[in-house]
Every structure is written in C-alpha cells, then in structure tokens.
Amino acid sequence: MPWVYDGNHSVIAFDNRHLGLSIIKGRFNRAEVALSIDDEDLTRSSVTAVIDATSIDTGNERRDDTLRGDIYLDVARFPTIDFRSSAIEQEGSRYVIVGSLTLHGATHEVRLLTTINGELTDQRGITHRGFSAQIAIRRSDYGISTTLVEGVFMAADAIHLSIELETTLRD
C-alpha cells in the first residue's frame, strides 16, 4: 500500500544567520512530494520533491520579495527547488537520504540525515508515519549571492534546512 505525503501536517523550514547577528527563520508553504516506501527494507525506498520557491515565507513580505528576486532565489528563472533521491543508507536507528538537490539552476549531491519519528493509527483508522530530516547547504555552491556589508556576509553562506514530513497510508 502506498504512503502519501501529507502537506497539511508537514513543514519545510530553513534558517540563516543575518549579518552574523541574528537568525532568520522561514519556510516554504507549497511542495509536491512523491514517496515510494518499501516497508520491508527502507533502503529500497525513494523520494522526490518539488518545492515551490515562490512560496518562501519568513513572516516579512518585504524580505520575502527580496529573497524571491534575482539576487537570491530568482524565482522568475528558477521557480522550483527539486530533490530526487538516489540512495538511502541506514546508519544505526537513522537513515541518510542521498540525492540530487537542484536550486538556482545548479545541482549537487546532498545527504539528508533522517529520523523516523514513529507510526500510529488514529481514531478514524488512518495510519500516519512521521519523519524528520536535516541538512546544511552552502548558498555559494548554488551560485546564490554572497553580498558583503562591512566585510560581513549580509546572509551567511550556510543555510540549514529542517523538514518535518508526515505521510498517510492509503489503500
């Protein structure tokens, strides 16, 4: 039986240090995720995700417009952020999802450290499974601006992504 991405109970979030002084947090509000989960051997599973880059949301519309612009995400040219797994490796009780991340027109292999948070069947008889994944990427690897202000990067090169993903088992 297939597991289906539950976008209503999932979050694709990020944080980035601004001027070395504070951490700005945000999220992407729209994504399509396709899963092929092998319950017998999770290392034979796969995942693809297409994140709508225009859905970036930091809670500040002016900042979001800047992030959508040509200095950063350039959503007019690159409207999506794409991930496609190529392998899943088990490391103790965790998994590493290896795959290609395409952002701002550049593609690099990444490794998402992933934890299975559990599985339960709710009072309606619907089975849910939760996952958490983390990764750090460098903007410069993807050709995204590294503007300096007084010798300090306006936004840090490192971007931390945190994914809380919930799936639902469908008949």
Image (tube, rainbow, N blue to C red):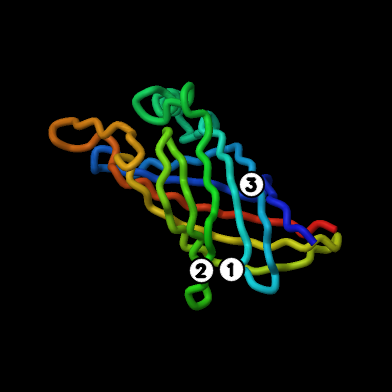
Give the residue displayed 48% in from the left and 33% down from the top: 59
Residue type highlighted by circle 3: Val
* Circle nearer the N terminus (1, 2): 1
Q: CA distance from mark 1 to mark 2?
A: 6 Å
Q: Secondary structure at mark 1?
A: helix
Q: Are marks 2 and 3 in contact (CB under 8 Å)?
A: no
Q: Of the numbered discs in the image, which one, if any, rests on residue 22?
A: none
Q: Is residue 17 above or below residue 168?
A: above
Which residue position is annotated with label 2?
Answer: 89
Give the residue displayed 73% in from the left and 68% down from the top: 120
* Circle nearer the N terminus (2, 3): 3
Which residue position is annotated with label 1?
Answer: 43
87 or 164: nearer the eye? Answer: 87
Q: CA distance from mark 2 to mark 3?
A: 20 Å
Q: Secondary structure at mark 3?
A: strand
Mark 3 crowd level (few <14, some 14–19, many ≥20, 10 Å Cα): some
1 vs 3, front mark: 1
Q: Name the quarter where the C terminus is drawn.
A: bottom right
Q: Secondary structure at mark 2?
A: strand
* Circle nearer the N terminus (1, 3): 3
Find residue 145 and report its horizontal and vertical position in percent.
30, 31
2 vs 3, front mark: 2
Q: CA distance from mark 1 to mark 3?
A: 18 Å
Q: Are marks 1 and 3 in contact (CB under 8 Å)?
A: no
Mark 2 crowd level (few <14, some 14–19, many ≥20, 10 Å Cα): some
Q: Is residue 143 above or below residue 12?
A: above
Which residue position is annotated with label 3?
Answer: 33
Residue type highlighted by circle 1: Thr
Q: Are marks 1 and 2 in contact (CB under 8 Å)?
A: yes
Give the residue displayed 33% in from the left and 40% down from the top: 139
Q: Is residue 160 above or below residue 91?
A: above
